[in-house]
Amino acid sequence: MKGSTGTAAPLDNATYTANTVFKSGSQIGTSEWYCVYNGTGSTVTITGLDGGIYQAMVCEYVGISGLEQYLTTTAPNNPVGINTEIIKSPQTITFDSIPPKTFGDEDFTPIATASSGLQVTYSVDSARIASVVNGKIHITGGGTCHVIASQIGDANYDGASSVSRTLVVNKASQSITFDALPAKLPGSAYCFSGYFYFGPACILYKLEPFGCNYSSRYIDHW
């Protein structure tokens, strides 16, 4: 049975069917004691146990099926307590350094592994520079941030200490395409198109008798 105290009390003239999978054999009444072995051997392997304290007890008997007479006297180490608590193993994370990236680069997968073989997850400490999308790092801007690799553990392994690596995202290069200027009269104003690598711009000029003044405006969709 599962628990730290108690004794088995099988009933005379009752036949109990054994099964080494816990709770699959016959139960003694409603006592939570289950028959796991019926034979003359000295050992048995029991499965189906979770973490915790269990009591195991050997009860000898005589008689044929249906006429059993059970000896339920206790003795030192009968019943005996069995601790099935799993002592988790530690684990560590190995995380390769991340080479510099450039704004506009494709999403990439960092290289981090846990000594347990369990899957590593990632997070980023600055959403302005990067985010995690489907397990990959998606670059959102230039600058420096940290990518953190984590493994929380499972039934057999403790959580690992997180490991971070620096991600440097360099600025992307750009170029300007500049249309030729048409002839205009002094005093007139006009707009011509200039095109930057990452988007169009409208640049406004006003012609003066001895030169011109200008202002510029960036337009997302122009």
Image: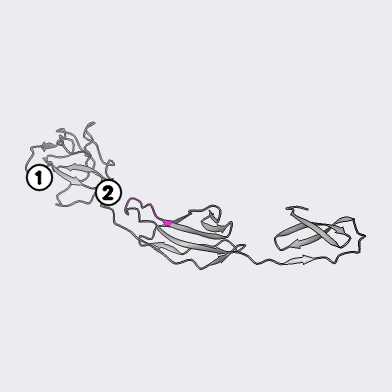
User: Which of the 4 image quadrants contains residue 55?
Assistant: top left
- Labelled pair 1, 2 in contact (Cβ < 8 Å): no
Camera-nearest residue between 105 and 194: 194
| Residue at (89, 64) in percent of width and height | 182
| Residue at (20, 51) in percent of width and height | 44
Main secondary structure found in the magenta portion: loop
- Relative image position of residue 139 (x, y in whole percent): 57, 58
Residue 47 shows which numbered tag?
Answer: 2
Residue 202 shows which numbered tag?
Answer: none
Q: Which residue is mark 1?
A: 77
| Residue at (87, 63) in percent of width and height | 210
Looking at the image, residue 31 lies above or below residue 135: above
Residue segment shown in magenta:
149-156
* Residue type (three-letter) at the residue carrying disc 1: Asn
Camera-nearest residue between 96 and 208: 208
Mark before the other along the chain sequence, 1 or 2: 2
| Residue at (56, 57) in percent of width and height | 138
Q: Is residue 79 left or right of residue 104?
A: left
Tag 1 secondary structure: loop
Looking at the image, residue 11 lies above or below residue 170: above
- Image quarter hosting the N terminus: top left
